[in-house]
Amino acid sequence: TQSTWGRKARRAFRIDTDRRDSMSLTKLATSTLAILAASTIAASARDQVQITGSSTVLPYATIVAEAFGENFDFATPVVEGGGSGAGRKKLCEGVGENTVDIANSSSRISQGDLDLCATNGVGEVMEVRIGYDGIVFASDIAGPAFALTPADVYGALAGKVAKDGALVDNAAAQWSEVNAALPAQNIMVFIPGTKHGTREVFDTKVIVEGCKATGAYDLFLATAEGADDKEKKTAAEKACNELRTDGKSIDVDGDYTETLARIDADKNGVGVFGLSFYQNNTDKLQVATMNGIVPTVETIAAGDYPVSRPLYFYVKKAHIGVIPGLKEYIEFFVSDEMAGPDGPLAEYGLVSDPELAATQAAVAAETPMGPLE
């Protein structure tokens, strides 16, 4: 029942790391071999859908997988984390029962991913948008409150900052040195490592925006090298994203539970989380505002909160009809009962997609994604 699924949304999710460690991911060198694999795995196909990727999408996928296993005559899918980029790379390793079926992702697939897929014979990929999520800054519940802007975050974490019309090394030690309205607390921010989709959104919507707001972007652009304006702008944004290496900005390669543990160990820490993770840990964390907006399902749905992003999963179409339960799982995931505004995913923190019906139709038709815009 839906109430049962709702209870699962509040339950700690399990990660099957043993299966991940034992999986043999065989790279198929040519499209010919890949097509052959797709045609021959039916007779000996495994009976579990294999899913990997984003730690942000992980709890949603786990909720769906557990409900799917309990309500359908198929084995419960195996859901693993590891990061969006790593998951998409695994998806594109080839076609066959030793390769994964679905990659969860908190950022959109890249042209580089699709090129890797094509090289390894993964011809058609389905893009499924499941909803939206916010990226939030949160700190220890007993500590001071933070009211942040992208400029504040950039001023705290950037390697170079603008001062008196020039770029200088960032020497700020406390938040109050960046903005007098912020707490006199040592700067220590735990940010997602580069393999996570959350990091891509953090870089674009927080760091680059803050870089522009402080004037640093214009200074980088003035000296940027490139064949044309586009290349120069890309170089300037890359320079904006070069963060401090003195212990103030700390990459976390694990999932959000590791970030939470870091904050628990050092109360000065501020962490970057998905909204749903924060909402399920409000007994330990307090959330910062961004540009004066409190991150909630409502402010993200309305487009008011500035740091939000769509969430996706990507499906290897060649495995549909071969891996038992794959099509059924995909349809179940995007059903009104699961991904709708009153479903368990929304209860856990997912912002329901207002265009969910279009996604459902595309999934039913097994529509592969077209060229990237």
Image (cartoon, rainbow, N blue to C red):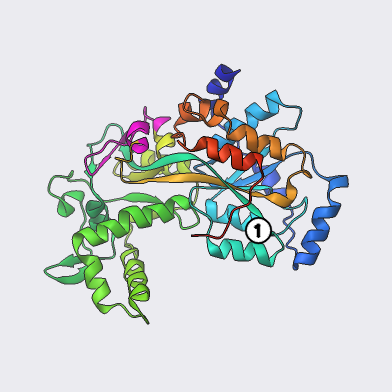
In the image, residue 25 lies in the stretch drawn in magenta:
no
Question: Dot 1 surroundings within 10 Å: few (below 14), some, or many (20 or more)?
Answer: many
- The residue drawn where x is 28% and y is 61% is 158
Relative to 84, 18 lies left or right: right
Quarter of the figure with residue 216: bottom left
Relative to 58, 183 lies left or right: left
Q: What x and y, as percent, mark residue 11?
A: 54, 26
- The residue drawn where x is 17% and y is 46% is 184
Circle 1 SS class:
loop
In the image, residue 295 lies in the stretch drawn in magenta:
yes
Relative to 109, 298 lies left or right: left
Instruction: Indicate the amino acid at tag 1.
Output: Cys
Q: What x and y, as percent, mark residue 248?
A: 31, 55
- The residue drawn where x is 22% and y is 54% is 151
Q: Does residue 248 appear in the picture of this structure?
A: no
Relative to 369, 101 lies left or right: right
**Residue in the foreground of this view, choosing between 365 and 346:** 365
| Count of all numbered marks drawn on residues in the image | 1
**Residue in the foreground of this view, choosing between 191 and 171:** 191
Q: Residue reaching furthest bottom?
A: 227
Relative height, residue 276 to residue 160 (above, below): above
Q: Does residue 52 appear in the picture of this structure?
A: yes
Span highlighted in magenta in the image: 279-301
Relative height, residue 147 to residue 141 (above, below): below
Q: What x and y, as percent, mark residue 64?
A: 60, 32
Q: Residue reaching furthest right?
A: 43
Q: What x and y, as percent, mark residue 173?
A: 21, 55
Relative height, residue 102 to residue 295 (above, below): below
**What residue would you read off at disc 1?**
92
Q: Quadrant of the N terminus?
A: top right
